[in-house]
Image: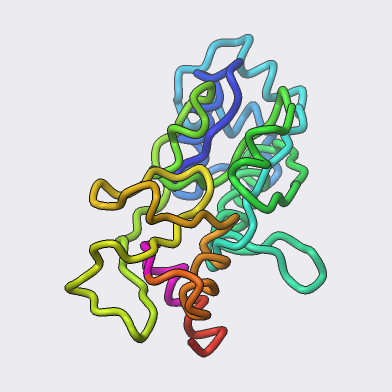
Amino acid sequence: MSILRSIGLRQLLCRLILFCLLVTALPTAANASSQERIASANLGLTALEQEYIGQSHEFQIIVIDGVAPLQYTDAEGEIRGITRLVLDEIAASTGLRFTYLAVDSTEEARTIDAPNGIVAAIDSAYIDSFPNMTLSQPFLQAPTVLFLHKSVDANNLTAKTFAGVKGGNLPPDVLPENAIYYNTREDAIRAVNAGEADYGYGNAYSVATYMISNRY
C-alpha cells in the first residue's frame, strides 16, 4: 500500500513520507517543533521546504472505505485502521495537520478536487487509476489471496464470474465480459459469498478480516 497525492510539492511530500516512516526511531524532544524534527531527520530539505512545513498547512486525507483492517469507518463514522495509525504518527511527529474524508470507491476519490489532498493507501493494482499523482514508497506489503464461492472449483475458474473492485486492473487471465465491479473489496467479498460472483482476489489481511467478521 502506498500514499498518493496530487501534482504539486511532490518532491517535498515524498521526502516527508520517508521521514515519517523513520521518525519514531529518531531521538527528538517531545516538544520539538516540526521544523526541528525535520532537521533532525537530515533529509536535506531546502529552507523553503522547511518553512512550508513550519506553516502547518492542512492536508485533506481521502480514505477509500471498506478495506479493513487497513482503513475503514466505524459505527460512529470515524476512520480507523492501519492507515489512520500511520497518519496519526506522522501528525504527532511533524506537527502537520490532517482532516479526513471517507469515500465509497476509487472512482469517487478520483473526482475530488483537493489541491492539498492525499489519497491514502492505494493498492498497487489501482495505480493506473491515478495517472496525475505521485506515488510514495510503500508502507505495507501484503500477499494476494483467492476467495471464492463454496460451489466453485479453484482449479477451474475459466468463464467464471470475477468480482473486481472499480478502478482496479483485471488479472491477465480474466476477460472483461466475465467481470463484475464493486465499490470496495468488502462489497466484492460479500457478492461472492451471496453467489452474485464466483471468485475474486484481495490482500490477505482484508479478506481474512471480512470473512471472519461476517462469518463467511
- Viewer-closest of 113 and 40: 113
Residue 203 showing in the rendered view: no
Instruction: Give residue 26's position: percent from left, percent from top.
Output: 47, 44
Color scheme of the displayed model = rainbow
> Which residue is at a point 48% across and 57% down the rendered structure image?
180
- Residue 155, placed above or below residue 203: below
Residue at the extreme left: 155
> Which residue is at a point 50% across and 49% down the rendered structure image?
24
- Viewer-closest of 151 and 142: 151
Instruction: Give residue 69's position: percent from left, percent from top.
Output: 53, 67
Residue 130 showing in the rendered view: yes
- Viewer-closest of 20 and 76: 76
Quadrant in the picture for residue 199: bottom left
**Stretch of the chain drawn in magenta:** 199-208
> Which residue is at a point 61% across and 15% down the rendered structure image?
8
From the viewer's perspective, tell me whether residue 96 is left or right of residue 199.
right
- Viewer-closest of 39 and 9: 9
Residue at the extreme right: 76
Instruction: Give residue 11's position: percent from left, percent from top.
Output: 50, 18
- Residue 37, placed above or below residue 159: above
Magenta highlight on residue 190: no
- Residue 66, placed above or below residue 172: below
- Residue 205, placed above or below residue 59: below
From the viewer's perspective, tell me whether residue 78 is left or right of residue 181.
right
Magenta highlight on residue 203: yes
> Which residue is at a point 38% across and 64% down the rendered structure image?
161
Instruction: Give residue 211's position: percent from left, percent from top.
Output: 48, 81
The total number of labels drawn is 0
